[in-house]
Image: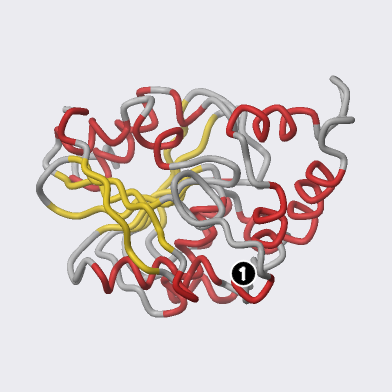
Amino acid sequence: MLSELRTHHCVGYSGARLAVHRLGAGRPVLLLHGLFSSAEVNWIKYGTAAKLAGAGFEAIMPDLRAHGQSDAPHDPAAYPHDVLVADAQAVVTALGLTDYDLAGFSLGARTAVQAVIAGLAPRRLVLGGMGLEGLSGWARRSAHFIDAIDRFGTIERGDPAFVAQAFMKSQKVDRLATRLLLQSVRDVGVQRLTSLTMPALVVCGADDGDNGSAPDLAAALPDGHYAEVPGNHMSSVTKPEFGEAIGEFLSGTAAR
């Protein structure tokens, strides 16, 4: 299945080249990865994309700007508010997607919510690793990561920022670009969640409280559903149950 992986580029906001990885053939599902990560780490490496492809979907997985194989500009003008939403819209337009599903993990989930509010209309929506407080309390979460960037290389084990530093090292993150990107993300007002009227799955690790309460987020959505999988914020995407929960929901076979 992985031999069928195709990669090409779309043009995002301000001309940034966005790498887009595709696996499978069937109903399109656009998958947005998390901060400091990539399509490879969140969706491909641990089998989620392959599970979706095997279930009859085409997994469409862009690397967010400043991540993976996509451009990481250092010009602050390349990071206006909600630039990731503009990039997601650009990918949807470039690929001619009109009937598709949308899923995101962590920062990708925030982006998916903002993109729907801005006008994207997927049939079904999946929000991974996200809770209600994570959408409305971005300033606190963003400050944690900016602190890790600013103290990179000096953070010792036991410090709350140590895990973020270690992940940045493993992914060879462009810290200047991701710092600019972090400042472009805005809070999502809880009252705006009423516009997410499509069936929506909130899937979260049993030990993942990084972005607040996932069950509360599911309850706040007009047609929200919650699925608990093993793991914490870092490990849940590596578990087979994560991809299985997404595939079952998008296929309409999830237990009610």
Q: Quadrant of the N terminus?
A: top left
Residue 87: percent from left, percent from top: 44, 68
- Along the viewing direction, whichever of 101 and 192 lies nearer the viewer: 101
Reply above or below: 230 against 126: above
Circle 1: residue type:
Val
- The residue at the point 23 percent across, 31 percent down is 51
- The residue at the point 21 percent across, 43 percent down is 6
Q: Quadrant of the C terminus?
A: top left
- Along the viewing direction, whichever of 56 and 162 lies nearer the viewer: 162
Residue under label 1, please give it.
188
Tell me the quarter of the picture where residue 44 sits: top left
Say how the picture is coloured: secondary structure
- The residue at the point 58 percent across, 33 percent down is 171
Q: Is residue 253 left or right of residue 189?
A: left
- The residue at the point 37 percent across, 68 percent down is 11
Q: Is residue 98 left or right of residue 138?
A: left
Residue 246: percent from left, percent from top: 32, 40
Count residues near mark 1 (Cα–Cα under 10 Å), then give few for <14, some for 14-19, many for 20+: many
Residue 128: percent from left, percent from top: 47, 45
Reply above or below: 191 against 227: below
Mark 1: secondary structure: loop
